[in-house]
Every structure is written in C-alpha cells, then in structure tokens.
Amino acid sequence: TAAGQPVFAYAMSFVLGLHVGLNRQVADVNLAPDRRCCDYLPDVATDRATGESYVAWYSRADGRRGVWAQRVVPPLGPRMRAPGSVVGDRSVGQDQRTAIAARSTGGGVYVAYCNGYPTCKGALLWRVGAPSALRAGGSADVEDANVAAAPEGRLWVMWHDGQSSRRILARRTNKAVTRLGPVRTIRPPRGTSAIWKLGGEGSLGPLDLLASVSTPGSLATWHTQVRPPLMLSVSVAKTKSSRKTVSFSVNDVGDPVANAKLTVGGKTRAVPAGGKLSLKLSRGRYAATATAPGYDAAKARVIVR
C-alpha cells in the first residue's frame, strides 16, 4: 500500500482470505462472505495513482463463475466480475494465479484473462471497474493469460496456445492502454510438450518472459527476453514530379520513439522527436529500416513511381 503495508490474499476451502499488514492480532477478512465453494488463485495489485489495493481471483461458485476483482484497501469496495470472463454462467478454469498488475504511471489496475467456453479463444485485458475489456488477441486455445507493467504506463499481455504447446504470444500496449502493438510469437524450447504456467516482468521495456515447460526428460522454468517492435509506416505523395516526397512515421503503437533512426537507400538519418520524417526520393525501389535502442527493428518496402 502507499503506507508501506503488505497485502496478502490466499484461498482455501470456503475462504478467500485477506490480511493487511504484519500484525497477527488483526483478524483476516473473508472476501467470500457466504462461504460457498469455491474461489481460487487470488493475487493483489496496488494502484500507484490512488493507493488503492485490489484483489483479483477466479470463482467457480454457482451463480458467480468467472474472474472477479474487488478493492480491499482503503475500505472494501463492491465485487466486480470481469466482462467476458463467463459465457452464460460457464467459464474455463485457471491453472495459475489470476493475472493482475498496476500501471507504472497514469493509474489503473488491470486484469488479464481468457474469454470463451468450452475453449477460450480470446485474451482480454480489463481495467478494473471499466464496463468493457480490450481484446488483446487470441489463438486456438488461449491459456495462462498474464499481464506485466511496462514503462510509461504501457502493459505487456501474454498467453500461450494450449493446442500446439509450441507458441507463446505477447503484445505491448500504447501509453494510454487503448491500443496494442503487433503480436510477437515466441517459440518455447525445442521438444516442448506442454506449457504449464506463464508470467513476465517488463518494467525496463523488454519483457522478461518466464514459462514452466515440459521437454524430453525435464520439467523446468525457461526464460527468454522479448523486445517490443517498432512500427514503421510509409506514405508517398501523389505528384507528377520525378522526385517525390516520401513521409515516414516511426512509432510505438502510435507513441513517438526517442532516438529512433531511419535508414533508406543506404543513408541513415535521425528521426525527429515527433516520430515523423519526410524525404525527397527519385523513382525506384527502396528498403527502409527503422531502429531504436531497446526495440526490434521495423522494415518496409518503398516504391516511388
């Protein structure tokens, strides 16, 4: 919490427990007041803008299945079901802690989860309290959706395809968490037969991706690093001159990128702070490459007629 108190959440039969602070004399709170089975796999995040802490969990109790969240510090708020976490009153169970994370700046606590029944086909990202969720993507069988904070208020969303066990997918949002960048496909270790859990940490920009995987003769934690991709768009002016104005935009899901460089026709130029650069180019075909520290390069073909 903003006051430096740890917040604990745990689950056991008929109990979704909450404890704030380290004083053993303070009684735990049961967030399942009717003591019906069952609430599972809670986790906690604290909104850096408001100081409010939230617990998110998965419930399989009749009449309240799905993913839920509740403000727990300061005083308890209402229980809120994540939109799209149930189909009718059916939902797919979870195998790991409910994914919840607070933005590094700008405020807001977000939960990642899957959508669909009997098989999840979509990965959703929900700002707790919002009436709808952002669809981060999907696959044949979405499993172990997770979320991690990134710099400047961005978030990483990740999940894996349970049908193939050969694809982990990740995307990073823009600063406002209203759009998502290109899907990154990550191949787990050779010979992977199953992926059991998935998580990540992205506070420095790249995503440190961790997975529990089964490979021939082992069950182990595997790590790789995923860098966000630059995005490069090109527009050629419609004029009759032999040299035409070609406009380039280099961005991170619409946000300008500092220290970006653009290479066209063998010449490299610094991209202005706004992320846009215009060049006069003669008729021909060009290869354009945008680079920036901490990013994977973006490439585009340019045809000037």
Image: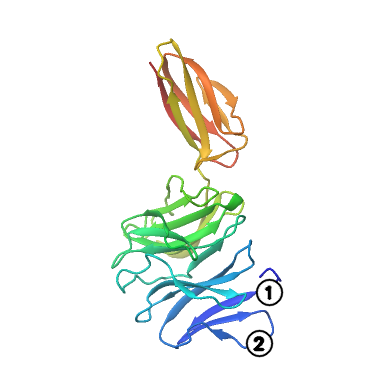
Q: Amino acid at mark 1?
A: Gln
- Quarter-of-image position of residue 149: bottom right
In depth, the one of 99 and 185 nearer the eye is: 99
In the displayed structure, does residue 164 sit left or right of residue 188?
A: left
Q: Is residue 150 above or below residue 68?
A: above
In depth, the one of 142 and 55 nearer the eye is: 55
- The residue sitting at 46% across, 50% down in the picture is 171
In the displayed structure, does residue 148 sit left or right of residue 166?
A: right
* x and y percentages locating residue 295 in the rendered image: 55, 41
* x and y percentages locating residue 31 in the rendered image: 51, 82
**Visible residue check, residue 192:** no
> Looking at this rendering, what residue extends furthest in the top direction?
242
Report which residue position mark 1 lands on: 5
In depth, the one of 292 and 253 nearer the eye is: 253
* x and y percentages locating residue 275 in the rendered image: 56, 33
Q: Amino acid at mark 2?
A: Val
- Of marks 1 and 2, which one's residue comes earlier in the chain? 1
User: Around disc 1, counting alpha carbons within 10 Å, would you say few (fewer than 14), some (14 to 19), or many (20 or more)?
Assistant: few
Alpha carbons under labels 1 and 2: distance apart: 13 Å
In depth, the one of 178 and 150 nearer the eye is: 178
User: Around disc 2, counting alpha carbons within 10 Å, would you say few (fewer than 14), some (14 to 19), or many (20 or more)?
Assistant: few
Q: Is residue 182 above or below residue 106?
A: above
- The residue sitting at 38% across, 67% down in the picture is 85
> Looking at this rendering, what residue extends furthest in the right direction?
3
**Visible residue check, residue 172:** yes
Q: Which mark is residue 103?
A: none
Q: Is residue 95 above or below residue 279?
A: below
Element under label 2?
loop
Element under label 1?
loop
- Quarter-of-image position of residue 213: bottom left
Report which residue position mark 2 lands on: 26
* x and y percentages locating residue 161 in the rendered image: 36, 57
